[in-house]
Amino acid sequence: MTAVGDIGGPTPDRRAVISVLRRLRSPEGQRAPLPLWAELRAMGDVVPAPWGGYFVTGFEACSQVLRGRNWLVPDIAWQERGPDPERWESLATREMSHVLSRLNAPAHTCQRRALGNLFDRRILERMQPEVEEHVRHLLDDLDTTLRVHGEADFVTIVGEQLPVRTVGHWLGIPTEDHAHILDITHRQVHAQELLPTGSELAVSAEATRLLRTYFTDLVRQRRARPGNDVVSGWIRHWDAELPGDREAADRLLYYLTMFLTIASLETSATLLSVAVWLLLEDPARWDWLRRHPEHIDAAVDEALRYDPPIHLNTRIAADDTVLAGVPIARDSMVHVLYGAANHDPRRNENPHAFDILRPGAHLTFGGGAHYCLGAALARLEARTLLTQMLDRFPGLKSAAAPTYAPRMVFRRLTSLKVTT
Ligand code: HEM
């Protein structure tokens, strides 16, 4: 997830790629990205990007990049040895260069080992009753709005609220701060887009300052009143790992709590809204799943495959290499396109069909050393939500097609109107 600056100097090939990118970022492109991913995939498994890197479009090639040891994330050392280090100078971009997903071994291995399996079966069993409770309350809110107005926006009432309540409760973020956290998360994300404009970076910079203040304070408060919660556990761990360097421990704890929050909110919210939209788009699907709740897990995974919340992720080549027959020089950037990969017909037959029962495969949570740490929690939220919704709202319908933020990397539904 990397900002790469402006596109310049199109050649005929580049022009075709730039045209797809422009359309992807438009509201129409976000409403219907599948033909655009197909257009890119038709150009090859590995397509030169206008700034000298590559887009990777095929499932196998993407999987190879995500899992291969000879592909690294673009870290600070790579930024500094590149020809254009100023490109990474903006505050929001620089700040994101320190988070877990932008570290390579050994720092990455050390942090992953310390975190362990964040959401193993035992932890999820403990969290399940509280997630069920959050869902019950949010569906009460949805019900009330539907009764009063006849129509409700699923995104704002439920989709964005469930992840912030779940992760907020887990990290100990007070309920009265949830709206603020959601707001700054939405504003920070511009810096992680592919081609942020100067004004988008300025919005992200301000949001970054607010995130830094908030999470530095969260860690400070937890130090003052430690308990048995997850953040107190991390404080104890890193104080022991970095004895005598409280500043380094606090810095690490700030990046960790801030990143876990922003990594979990928009992504999970998009999954919840996408899953509900894909099921309501054809009322027969909603009805079928209501009668076959044993397939809810499969429906969640098909939604993850069909419309991944993150559309693009970046790696760099550790050595000169060849990917899908294309020579790639050391330090070149490659952009893995999850959506294009998941719709590769060589891997998922008839890929544009939303088919709950397909034996599908997807790369939506990434792969290899950086595989998403929150996948099990996101699935728990989606499963709990659909289970209760199908039961409580058997006749739910979409009132209008969803609307989307004009982004290319982090997909976000801004509204999904439903009615009964
Ligand atoms: C549907 C929801 C989610 C999606 C689609 C998603 C997707 C991803 C993807 C694509 C990556 C990068 C993987 C790679 O580079 O190979 C990632 C990394 C990560 N995700 Fe998620 N994520 C979701 C929810 C969550 C949640 C709920 C949390 C935490 C509570 C979380 C925490 C993380 C962390 C910490 C990383 C960095 C892992 C590393 O670099 O070692 N994610 N996620």
Image (tube, rainbow, N blue to C red):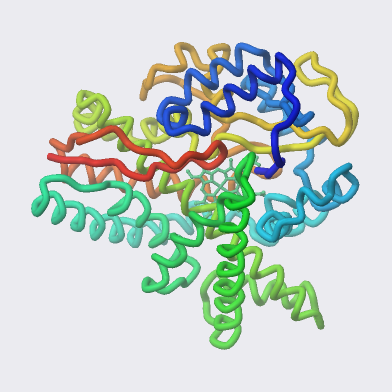
Q: Point out residue 152 in the picture as x, y percentages from the top left corner.
A: 20, 48
Residue, x 45% and y 61% (percent of image)?
183
Q: Point out residue 312 in the picture as x, y percentages from the top left corner.
A: 61, 35
* Looking at the image, residue 149 lies above or below residue 52: below
Q: Point out residue 175 in the picture as x, y percentages from the top left corner.
A: 37, 71
Q: Viewer-proximal residue, 265 or 284?
A: 265
Q: Point out residue 18 in the picture as x, y percentages from the top left corner.
A: 63, 24
* Looking at the image, residue 376 lies above or below residue 364: below
Quadrant the C terminus occupies: top left
Q: Viewer-proximal residue, 357 or 364?
A: 364
Using residue 100 as the reference point, say whether residue 321 is left or right of it: right
Using residue 248 as the reference point, say whether residue 136 is left or right of it: left
Q: Looking at the image, can residue 109 be seen?
A: no
Using residue 197 as the reference point, say whether residue 406 is left or right of it: left
Q: Viewer-proximal residue, 349 or 76?
A: 76
Residue, x 63% and y 39% (percent of image)?
194
Quadrant the N terminus occupies: top right
Residue, x 47% and y 54% (percent of image)?
265
Using residue 377 as the reference point, say whether residue 367 is left or right of it: right
